[in-house]
Image (cartoon, coloured by chain):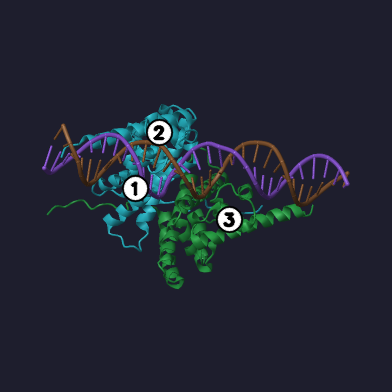
Chain colours: A cyan, B green, C purple, D brown
Amino acid sequence: MHEGLRERKKRETRQRISDIATGLFIARGFDNVTVAEIAQAADVSVNTVFNYFGTKEDLFADRQELAVDLPQRVLRERAPGEGVVRAFRRDYLDAIDTRDWRYGLNEGSDVFTGVVNASPALVARLREIAVAREEGLARALAGELGAGPGDLTPGIAAAQILATTRILSDHALARMLAGEPWERIAPSLREQAERAFDLLESGLGDYGARPAADDG
Amino acid sequence: MHEGLRERKKRETRQRISDIATGLFIARGFDNVTVAEIAQAADVSVNTVFNYFGTKEDLFADRQELAVDLPQRVLRERAPGEGVVRAFRRDYLDAIDTRDWRYGLNEGSDVFTGVVNASPALVARLREIAVAREEGLARALAGELGAGPGDLTPGIAAAQILATTRILSDHALARMLAGEPWERIAPSLREQAERAFDLLESGLGDYGARPAADDG
DNA sequence: ACCAAGTTTGCAGTGACACCAAATTTGTGG
DNA sequence: CCACAAATTTGGTGTCACTGCAAACTTGGT
């Protein structure tokens, strides 16, 4: 039941391809690197690359795939009596403080984002992953709360929660890309997160109500 | 300042290509139709197709593109004193009653959806359009309410509102695809919409709070 | 009729990816 | 150590979206 030579080589080859590809992508941009090039640099045939990775985008997204069920973990591990929104609020604030990668706030995520934004294919890929995350969370919520198929609340809750974190992180990322140091970003991000989650909890109310026109 | 022969021909050609392409897509599926085929059927060269449409997906998305600023219209035309959520609630319920296409509830939208879902490329395209809609609404909100760049509320509101309509329509679409008649779908969809927009207004609160474990 | 600008077309790539059959490598029983 | 089967890699060949370019053609204005 040990790991044979075969499996080890496979793992190594896969890793080598992924690493080399990522390096090339960061250095020269996703669209300016051909799979043939990657194959050559990794000393395998093009076919082998496609044996391991179904598409070129998979070469870059690899790690992100794993993050699909992180939201479900937050759900599962919330404290007794703790609502879903509170759990995510806690988790997000914690991610800010520890600069954890799970909401894309780690160091180097600006470089990563730069590469992604330069390629429509990668942008599309990340969105797909976001959708998977949302669907996963929605399913988990529905399952745990025993919601029937006619109850759309789990889906809506999942969408709203992840939309909130997404917008918070997008904003932070934009500031990082603009060269603002993390020390300046973090405190205001904390405030914004607090306000955003407050909004989630208490709703939009009559946000944007236009004052009755009193003509004068 | 009339429309010359040139411009008319252009419009006609574009329309012909788009129509023929759409027909072929619906008949045989997006991925089973080549651009060369479309070109031949439309009696133009492949290059001409790409002159009018940047990508193959553009051939199908064409009409949807126009819908990008519909949400902004809802915002702009809301009544005095009416909050954003209420405006969209009204608009969505109206769309159900009139079976309008603006939220994808029209007849034939199930066929459309079937074609889209069968092709990853088209799915990605529609998501892109959804993103554009969201960004547009967010910008419009921010502009009208005079929100500063540090205020994330417009973005969050836009995301939450469109997420709500998206989920409502997705659900309805799924039922249409399952063959359920519209007459049965509409009433329950109305209820679900009411509840969904209520949720938007008043927030998630402590939704999903897990009861404190009293062991026994 | 004639010229300039706009449009269409053919041609020759490039690059992602599919399919397949021929090597090559690795795990296993004798 | 020697097959032998299964897994893996590889080369080859092909399709299709899409690009860039220069030639041919169409249209508007003179």
Q: Residue at x 27, y 59 (%)?
A: A146
Q: Numbered disc 2: what chain?
A: A
Q: Numbered disc 3: what chain?
A: B
Task: Looking at the picture, tell me which residue is in the foreground, B39 or A106.
Answer: B39
Q: Are the residues tagged 2 and 1 within 8 Å (C-beta)?
A: no
- Residue B90 can be seen in this image: no
Q: What element carries label 2?
A: helix
Q: Which of marks 2 and 1 is in front?
A: 2
Circle nearer the N terminus (2, 1): 2
Q: Position of residue A164 (x, y in %)?
A: 41, 45
Q: How far apart are the alpha carbons under marks 2 and 1?
A: 45 Å
Q: Which of marks 3 and 1 is in front?
A: 3
Q: What element carries label 3?
A: helix
Q: Which residue is drawn at 28% across and 52% down?
A: B209
Task: Looking at the picture, tell me which residue is in the foreground, A205 or A166.
Answer: A166
- Residue A10 can be seen in this image: yes
Q: On the image, numbered disc 3 is attached to which residue?
A: B38
Task: Looking at the picture, tell me which residue is in the foreground, A148 or A112.
Answer: A112
The amino acid at mark 2 is Ala
The amino acid at mark 1 is Val
Q: Which residue is drawn at 38% across and 41% down?
A: A50
Q: On the image, numbered disc 1 is attached to which residue?
A: A85
Q: On the image, numbered disc 2 is attached to which residue?
A: A39
Q: How crowded is mark 3: few (under 14 residues within 10 Å), some or many (20 or more)?
A: many
Q: Residue at x 42, y 40 (%)?
A: A57
